[in-house]
Image (cartoon, coloured by chain):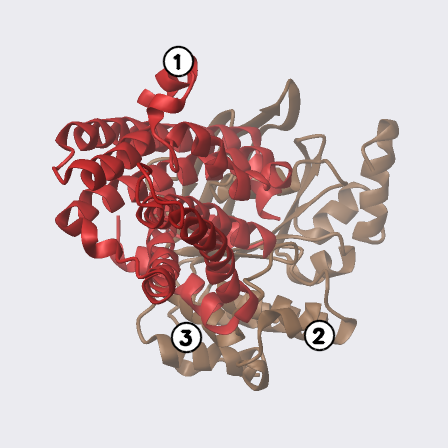
Chain colours: A brown, B red
Amino acid sequence: MSIPQSWLRPILTMAERVVEVRGLTKVFNGFKAVDGISFEVMKGEILGILGPNGAGKTTTMHMLLGLTTPTAGDIRILGMDLRRNREEILSRVNFSSSYVSLPYSLTVRENLTVFSRLYGVRGRRKKIAELLDVFGIEEIKNEPTRRLSSGQITRVSLAKSLLNDPEVLFLDEPTASLDPDMADRTRKLLKRFNRERALSILYTSHNMQEMEEMCDRIIFLDRGRIVASGGPAEIMAEFSGATLEEVFLKIARKDGGAG
Amino acid sequence: MKVSRVLSYTTRHLYLYRRSLPRLMEVFYWPLLDLLVWGFISVYLSTYKGSLPDFVTFFVGALILWDILFRCQQGISVSFLEDMWSRNLLNVFVSPMSPVEYVLSLLLISLFKLFLASTVMILVAMAMYSFNIFQFGVLLVPLVANLIVMGWAVGIITTGIILRYGQEAEVLAWGIAFLFQPVSAVFYPVSVLPPSIRTIARYVPSSHVFEGMRHVIATGTFPTKELVWAAGLNMVYLGAAVVFFYLNFKGVKKKGLLVKVGE
């Protein structure tokens, strides 16, 4: 799996903020799912959002994608306010989740064609051919999605998420349905995209080892609040844990926590 | 709004029908069965000569026109369900496509399905019952246009409800149009309805369309009044449907339900 040279972009200054979140809050029927969190993602950074079930990770990601309306707070992506510039922002970011699929009756190529048109991708055929090659799904391009394994669907979904050369990629447990070999390949591929194209990634996963391996920085959510933030090593040191998993268990079980 | 995005998403559904025989059959199956049953009933009743109207024209014409409304409503709602069933809605709503563009793509696909179903029905009606829908001449345009718009309005409202209540409300995609059938006076004049239902029928666009159809068959004159009523009511219906969908979409995002429907 190799990334075509044409995709390589000059790495811009690492200090550029691509996502800025201030005082983000979401209340569902009196329950604070996300409680005034603030964070940012820098250009070329992989930020992991970690936390037990119900901590607010997915709600946060959905607010960043405009799928859920925040109760309070501001979201700026690529320097623009999400409320006012939805179309412009969404054309420059993308999303993949192991919980979201693609139309079952369409072939892999048809699915990628439909989404490349939605994102207004230029040089569609070439781009799709490149992605089919990068994700090793060339041989299944004419297969209806319903006939694919969950691992293959995940790879097609990831290919879809890179159609528009996104500047920010939102990944919700992207390797959840992959076997260890394919999960490892996918992580390496995402790392390469991140490194070679200065692609910023916002990442959620329940696989602590994966988070350690992938993320430059992690924010740890518990009951809607950020309880820890920093590089994986910093967080492990702060909570005296040998692994992120240990830290996770400490935080999740503290005061009968959500986990 | 970008037309290219609307057309792009319409192709998603066209791909679907190109390959799926069951889906393609679904477009023809029910209309053809309806046409056969009602057509034969009409032929049978026609053997009783008397002061009764031309049954074939009344029933078969009404059936083909009713199917226009039904197909348009279903074309929108079922296409939305296709996205829900395939867990694809989140991919759609995290793309730059706006909800308005999405709904417009559903309207386009409903026209495509309508075209397929109507073509077959019209040809079968001609071949089996010597019924020519084009006997209505230029009047056919406002009749059909009004039924399409009402079908769209009902379809958009149905989609809004499914968006809000998810799979629990799926059944509406197939059933909601029939809620309007008794008051639409498809196969009988509005005058046979009880007074209270007649009042309701007055505010249903399709009842004016079918009254208009019967008027032209009986008198041969253009039913201006009925068509003006139908068009006026349709504007209100469509406007209300768009507002309803918009408010629902906004509410669904606020409640975080879009994600639940989409996953």
User: Hey, what amino acid is under mark 2?
Assistant: Met
**Percent position of residue A255, x then y:** 86, 27
Q: Where is mark 2, residue-wise?
A: A182
Task: Kindly report the distance in space between the C-alpha atoms of the residues bearing marks 3 and 2.
Answer: 24 Å
Task: Say left or right for A37 vs B187.
Answer: right
* Element type where label 3 sits in the image: loop
Q: Disc 1, disc 3: CB below 8 Å?
A: no
Residue that extends furthest to the top in the rendered view of this protein: B196
Task: Kindly report the distance in space between the C-alpha atoms of the residues bearing marks 2 and 1.
Answer: 69 Å
Task: Say left or right for B55 vs B169.
Answer: left
**Percent position of residue B248, x then y:** 46, 30
> Which label sits on residue B185?
none
Name the mark nearer the viewer: 1 or 3: 1
Is residue B214 placed above or below A27 in the rendered structure? below
Q: Where is mark 3, residue-wise?
A: A8
**Percent position of residue A9, x then y:** 38, 71
In the rendered image, is residue A69 in sight? Answer: no
Q: Disc 3, disc 2: CB below 8 Å?
A: no
